[in-house]
Image: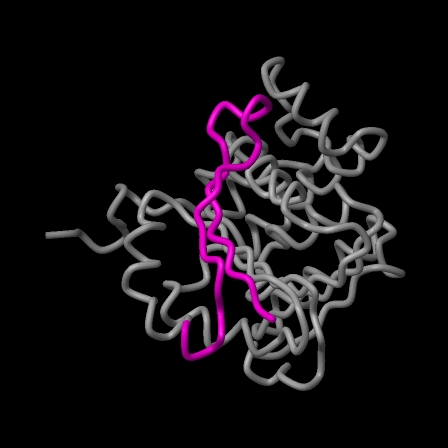
Amino acid sequence: MQRPGEGPEGPRIDAALVAVPPEEAPRPTEAELGAVEHYFGDRAELAQRYVGHLASSGIERGLLGPREIPRLWSRHVLNCAAVADAIPQGALVADIGSGAGLPGIVLALSRPDLMMVLVEPLERRCQWLDEVVEDLGLESRVDVVRARAEQMVGQIDADVVTARAVTALRTLVPLTLPLISGTGELVALKGRSAELEIEKAQKIIRKYKGHDVRVETLGEGFLEEPTTVVRIAVG
């Protein structure tokens, strides 16, 4: 039985005491530098600035847990950056449940050719996203919209829809595929349960006219742990 003040991983942590100043945010390890150069190029310092936001105000405002600070690059930023390999040139990308900008802001930094719409229902998260987008100078290519995914149907015609840690595929598909009115694709970041989720979502995928469903690993050769995505084509 848990004692008051404890979570499943032990005593709860006061995030305000754990968050670090942006300039003290973790930097990529020697092993990660190749991936950083590959995905961000001359925008690597902007990506570092973003990590500074995650490690400070992102932790303080509860967008990420304090225990994530040491693995912001490996588990979050580079994990999301690999998704850039799955997105066509010049695409309009809708990132659903954008939260801390993962993968939305990461893709905007990695791919200057993309136009991004970050869809997030919680006001406090939208406020944080707006602040970070402005600080990183991404306003011309990134819009933050406070809305639920279903409210955006008919308001946007995305080429690609992304989602990370939002919900299982059988629930995610009805929220995302309707945002693509022509030809496009859902790229959902998933873990080891990807194949099982596809199996459980087969009926709903067909209902929403999804096809060419496949699991891919991205970032091989650059990431120690490649990123797993489920891709579902539309149109």
The picture places residue 101, in percent across and down from the top left corner, at: 64, 54
Say left or right for 82 vs 174.
Answer: right
Q: Residue at x 33, y 73 (%)?
A: 203
Which quadrant is the C terminus positioned in?
bottom right
Q: Residue furthest top?
A: 30
Residue 211 is a magenta residue: yes
Q: Residue furthest left?
A: 1
* 35 lies above or below 48: above
Residue 10's image quarter? Answer: top left
Q: Which span of residues is magenta-colored? A: 206-235
Residue 56's image quarter? Answer: top right
Residue 157's image quarter? Answer: bottom right
Residue nearest the viewer, comparing 235 with 136: 235
Count of all numbered marks drawn on residues in the image: 0
Say left or right for 95 vs 207.
Answer: right
Say left or right for 138 vs 161.
Answer: right
* 34 lies above or below 77: above
The picture places residue 209, in percent across and down from the top left corner, at: 49, 75
Residue 156 is a magenta residue: no
The picture places residue 153, in percent across and down from the top left corner, at: 62, 83
* 222 lies above or below 10: above
